[in-house]
Image (tube, rainbow, N blue to C red):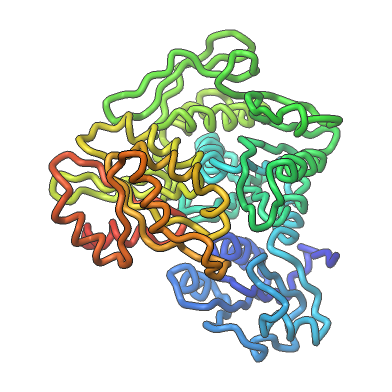
């Protein structure tokens, strides 16, 4: 594998530079005086920001973008061998790294590197930890898979030994990471277009955990059924968190305030500690915050800064994000695209004052929708009104195996009001006619469903 010498900046080209993660890595390297070029399928605010920082970005991907002065090319899992730029790099024998391999090499430059993994909750937990690091004035470098207001985007380049990033299991990309501290929030069946099933996913997380050095630490959810399989034969230290009192870190006396935000008493080793105040809702976020607290404690951050960081964190964009009000209807946007995440969002919404609860759900990928069809129906039936729009294909093509109309029909069989619309405009018109005073409306999914809420609000 090609190894970057970070003391000798070179010309690096990113195929797909406009992605949330790729753009963040490009920004880190720009600030380290690397020459950065790249390409993307379409223009965006992210691309414009990179250009303003000095990157050369081409809209559209073609072989001509691969110039002879490029020293290294970085690409994502979405780029295949039939991509013109990928093929041109191979023909010119230009060294290539995956996005994950580059992130792994960047991570190695930091003494206190933290990788946040888990099927659910990575962005929120990474953001919580980032807020704690900032509150403690540690000057961290941060790479998060969402927009975090406190850093003005998805990346922050610091000058200290602290580094925190998300670690995604898709295509086993987090196997390229060798952090000092790893978090495993949970392990669930997902990305079934790549993994054969839950057993292979568990093994993938176990491999990720084995990348920790002997003096490293795994901070892991002790409530997981697969805990023993994930943690077997590890030589690093292990700290547990979770909802049960068998964990080192767990909560007690959990309450939700009038806004649905969570408060709890922090318990460590069976002893009551401080009261923790979160500025977000959801029991799942109580669990996420415990993982962040465990990291902060391990790194010697004063608990005062940890509590301030958690209290000041108002959520990352697209994570139960308040978008505004339409008359007396509250509009929320959420990234949930897995049944477990949908149930967590439903629980959070239930703690939020409302009359009736609406969700506009955009399934994400045909593979996931087909594989977890019954689980999706079971999770969505808990809303008062469910609106389905077309499946967001992402990296896939339509197999014909499943359609959003099928999911709407199945949910309706449970007795829940569910219907399918073929266009966003039709959904908007229906909502304007049928939402009532004090209803709560959630746009949900990992695609572009958020545009419906923004259109309704006139943003």
| For residue 192, above or below residue 138 | below
- Evaluate whether residue 459 shows in this view: no
Specify whether residue 137 is in view. Answer: yes
**Residue at the image position 58 percent from the left and 80 percent from the top:** 56
Residue toward you, 218 or 70: 218
Please indicate whether residue 321 sits to the left or right of residue 88 in the image: left
Question: Of all residues shown, which one is farthest toward the bottom?
Answer: 64
Please tell me which residue is depicted at 53% across the width and 69% down the height of the picture.
Answer: 398
Q: Quadrant of the C terminus?
A: bottom left
| In the image: residue 107, left or right of residue 164 | right
Task: Please state the horizontal and vertical placement of residue 385, each as a whole percent of the image.
Answer: 28, 44
Residue 252 position in % (x across, y down): 49, 14
At a point 63% along the width and 45% down the height, the residue shown is: 164
Q: Quadrant of residue 8?
A: bottom right
Above or below, 354 against 401 in this view is: above
Q: Nearer the viewer, residue 302 or 413?
A: 413
Q: Where residue 55 sits: x, y (%)?
A: 57, 76
Q: Residue furthest front?
A: 413
Q: Position of residue 204 (x, y in %)?
A: 75, 45
Depicted 101 relative to depicted 269: above or below: below
Taking 401 as reference, is 235 left or right?
right
For the view shown, which residue lies furthest in the top direction?
A: 271
């Amino acid at each position: 594998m090609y190894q970057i010498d970070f003391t000798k900046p070179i010309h690096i080209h990113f195929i797909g530079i406009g992605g949330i993660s790729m753009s963040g890595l490009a920004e880190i390297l720009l600030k380290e005086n690397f020459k950065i070029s790249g390409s993307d399928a379409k223009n965006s605010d992210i691309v414009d920001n990179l250009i303003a920082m000095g990157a050369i970005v081409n809209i559209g991907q073609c072989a001509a973008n691969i110039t002879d002065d490029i020293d290294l090319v970085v690409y994502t899992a979405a780029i295949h061998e039939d991509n013109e730029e990928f093929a041109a790099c191979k023909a010119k024998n230009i060294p290539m790294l995956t996005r994950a391999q580059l992130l792994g090499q960047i991570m190695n430059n930091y003494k206190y590197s933290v990788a946040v993994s888990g099927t659910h909750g990575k962005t929120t937990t990474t953001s919580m930890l980032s807020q704690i690091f900032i509150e403690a004035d540690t000057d961290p470098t941060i790479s998060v898979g969402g927009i975090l207001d406190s850093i003005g985007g998805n990346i922050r380049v610091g000058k200290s030994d602290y580094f925190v990033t998300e670690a995604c299991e898709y295509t086993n990309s987090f196997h390229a990471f060798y952090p000092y501290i790893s978090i495993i929030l949970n392990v669930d069946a997902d990305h079934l277009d790549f993994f054969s099933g839950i057993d292979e996913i568990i093994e993938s997380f176990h491999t990720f955990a084995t990348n920790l050095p002997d003096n490293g630490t795994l901070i892991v959810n002790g409530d997981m059924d697969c805990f023993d399989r994930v943690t077997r034969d590890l030589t690093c230290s292990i700290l547990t968190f979770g909802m049960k009192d068998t964990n080192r870190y767990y909560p007690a006396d959990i309450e939700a305030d009038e806004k649905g935000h969570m408060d709890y008493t922090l318990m460590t080793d069976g002893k009551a500690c401080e009261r923790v105040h979160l500025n977000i809702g959801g029991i799942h976020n109580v669990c996420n915050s415990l993982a962040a607290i465990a990291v902060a404690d391990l790194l010697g951050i004063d608990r005062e800064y940890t509590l301030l960081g958690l209290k000041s964190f108002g959520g990352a964009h697209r994570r139960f994000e308040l978008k505004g009000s339409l008359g007396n209807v509250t509009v929320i946007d959420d990234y949930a695209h897995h049944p477990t995440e949908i149930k967590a969002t439903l629980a959070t919404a239930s703690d939020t004052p409302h009359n009736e609860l609406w969700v506009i759900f955009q399934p994400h990928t045909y593979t996931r929708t087909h594989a977890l069809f019954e689980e999706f129906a079971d999770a969505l039936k808990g809303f008062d009104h469910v609106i389905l729009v077309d499946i967001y294909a992402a990296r896939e093509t339509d197999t014909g195996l499943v359609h959003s109309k099928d999911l709407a029909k199945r949910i309706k069989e449970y007795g829940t009001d569910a219907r399918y619309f073929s266009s966003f405009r039709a959904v908007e018109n229906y909502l304007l006619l049928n939402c009532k005073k004090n209803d709560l409306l959630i746009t949900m999914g990992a695609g572009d469903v958020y545009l419906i809420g923004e259109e309704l609000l006139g943003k």
